[in-house]
């Protein structure tokens, strides 16, 4: 078990913060795919991602509403969450380990990558998570609102010595390949 001294000496960097997107943004996102849900009520109960223990690397993302995935089914979840991340860092998203192990739960893009400049996007940096139950054992996944289903880990990254990119993101999925190319 890590001691307080170990944690101080390790000097874990505080490089990000989670926030909710605006209420209007969230309501619009939910109504697009889930018109029967009460988006305003869901918005009020959104939980910001948290680590379960002080030794946890991952921040648990919590389901905004109940959902069920039968084998082979997919769902796109508007989390209502955005992340303000210092430059030089990225947030990587993965299924929670136990759900991947029990249900072969997978993100459709294998690993979600949330860049630091996504925060300032037109969609407020709203993090969407698309999941598939890839169970080959016939297991149905049921997740209740407020239960953890995904985890995010902040990773520092570097760039090449000759990198001179100056383009600015404006958009979500696939938008970084549209800038200046």
Image: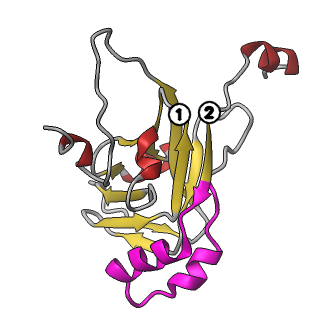
Q: Is residue 96 left or right of residue 137?
A: right
| Residue 34 on the magenta segment | yes
- 141 or 78: which is nearer to us? 78
Instruction: Tell me the magenta residue range.
Output: 19-48
Q: Position of residue 85 (x, y in %)?
A: 54, 39
Q: Position of residue 31 (x, y in %)?
A: 39, 83
Callout in the foreground (2, 1): 2
Q: Position of residue 143 (x, y in %)?
A: 51, 67
Tell me if residue 117 comes above or below residue 89 in the rendering: below
Q: Is residue 53 left or right of residue 78?
A: right
Identify the residue shown where x is 28% and y is 54%.
134
Identify the residue shown where x is 44% and y is 22%.
157
Give the mark count: 2
- 60 or 22: which is nearer to us? 22
Which residue is denoted by mark 1 in the rendering? 154
Cα–Cα gap, marks 2 and 1:
8 Å
| Residue 30 in view of the camera | yes
Q: Are marks 2 and 1 in contact (CB under 8 Å)?
A: yes
Q: Quadrant of the N terminus?
A: top right
Identify the residue shown where x is 50% and y is 75%.
66
Tell me if residue 30 comes above or below residue 88 in the rendering: below
- Label 1: few (<14), some (14–19) or many (≥20) C-alpha neighbours in 10 Å: some
Which residue is denoted by mark 2 in the rendering? 15
Q: In the displayed orientation, state which residue is furthest to the front.
A: 166
């Amino acid at each position: 078990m890590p001691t307080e001294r170990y944690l101080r000496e390790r000097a874990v960097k505080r490089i990000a913060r989670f926030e909710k997107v605006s209420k209007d943004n969230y309501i619009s996102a939910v109504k697009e795919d889930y018109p029967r849900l009460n988006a305003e009520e869901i918005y009020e109960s959104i939980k910001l991602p948290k680590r379960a223990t002080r030794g946890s690397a991952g921040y648990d993302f919590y389901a905004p509403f109940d959902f069920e995935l039968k084998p082979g089914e997919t769902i796109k979840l508007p989390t209502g969450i955005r992340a303000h991340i210092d430059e030089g860092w990225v947030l990587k998203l993965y299924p929670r380990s136990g759900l991947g192990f029990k249900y072969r739960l997978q993100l459709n893009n294998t690993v979600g990558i949330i860049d630091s400049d996504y925060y300032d996007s037109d969609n407020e940096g709203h993090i969407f998570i698309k999941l598939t139950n890839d169970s080959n054992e016939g297991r149905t996944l049921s997740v209740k609102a407020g239960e953890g289903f995904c985890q995010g880990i902040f990773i520092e990254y570097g760039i090449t010595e000759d990198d001179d990119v100056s383009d600015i993101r404006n958009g979500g999925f696939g938008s970084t390949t549209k800038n200046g190319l």
